Amino acid sequence: MSNLHTLIIIISSISLFVIGVPLLYGSLLPIIKPTISKNSYKYLYAFSSGFFLMVATVLFIGESKTHLEEFFIETTKNNKVAAKFIVGSIVAGIVFFGLLISLGAKYFFVKTRKSKNLNDVFVDNHNHDEMIFNINDYNPKSKTIAIFFLLSHRIPDGIIIGLLCSQIAREGVDPVSIIFLCSFIMHIIPEELIIYYRQIEMGISRKKATLNSLLAVICIIPLIIIGAVIS
């Protein structure tokens, strides 16, 4: 079997694995629990915010930090202090860069979009304790921006999965690959909850909200293919 055929089989299998679970879950959600109470929204957003932060820091940043330390300890000839300093600087730089992008996006939308609907997402018509999700936003349609930002991170996710498919085709399956794929499925489930119920808050019908949520999952497949091709 050629490498291309192997890669196609791996992409198909992994896509079915990482997309199948959210698709099944997203299809059953409107049937099992079509709507939730206002208090449930608060619990959902609080749990999801904490969950995303833990996955990002403990799993992704923690795993990257471990591999970087191993690399720089070897590069610096077992100088652990220098290795930790370099890794700390890299992590701090990435965090700073991420905050810069987030604040820059916020500034862009506030300054360039004068529409009241868009500005309400960011400015003074809400409680600033709600840093990630603004539950008290009186204009539900402005929540579209929050959904957009939530979905935007699936672009690198899909490309990374594609790169992972290419690596598996060349080197075989390793524990890190399995952990990453499982973590992706784990974190996309609360995402699906937020995306679906956020649309219900906006007054979108259950049928359309379900369709939009499922399409958002399916759109990861082209990104996986792009990642595999550029690898």
Image: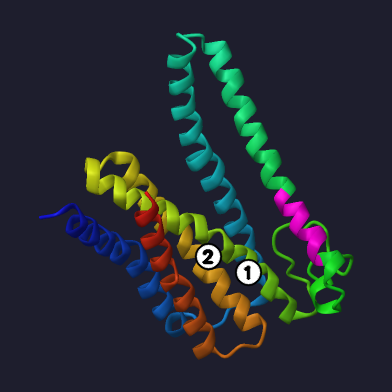
| Figure colour scheme | rainbow
Residue 5 image position (x, y, % from top left)? 18, 59
Question: Is residue 106 highlighted in magenta?
Answer: yes
Does residue 223 sit above or below 100 in this rendering?
below
Question: Is residue 26 highlighted in magenta?
Answer: no
Q: Residue at x 78, y 59 (%)?
A: 106
Residue 26 image position (x, y, % from top left)? 43, 75
The numbered mark, 2 or 1, whose residue comes first in the sequence reads 1
Could you say which is closer to the camera, residue 87 or residue 108? 108
Could you say which is closer to the camera, residue 153 or residue 39? 153
Q: What's the magenta region?
A: 101-109
Q: Amino acid at mark 2?
A: Glu
Indicate left or right for 53 with 4 as reference: right
Q: Residues within 10 Å of mark 2 (few under 14, many from 20)?
A: some
Q: CA distance from mark 2 to mark 1?
A: 12 Å
Q: Residue at x 70, y 74 (%)?
A: 143
Residue 34 appears in the rendering: no
Q: Nearer the viewer, mark 2 or mark 1?
A: 1
Q: Residue at x 48, y 41 (%)?
A: 59
Q: Amino acid at mark 1?
A: Phe
Q: Secondary structure at mark 2?
A: helix
Viewport quadrant of the N terminus: bottom left
Indicate left or right for 105 with 65 as reference: right
Could you say which is closer to the camera, residue 96 or residue 196? 96
Q: Which mark is residue 99?
A: none
State the predominant SS element of the stretch in magenta.
helix
Residue 27 appears in the rendering: yes
| Residue tagged 2 | 191
Residue 177 image position (x, y, % from top left)? 33, 45
Q: Which mark is residue 148?
A: 1
Residue 62 image position (x, y, % from top left)? 50, 35
Q: Residues within 10 Å of mark 1 (few under 14, many from 20)?
A: few
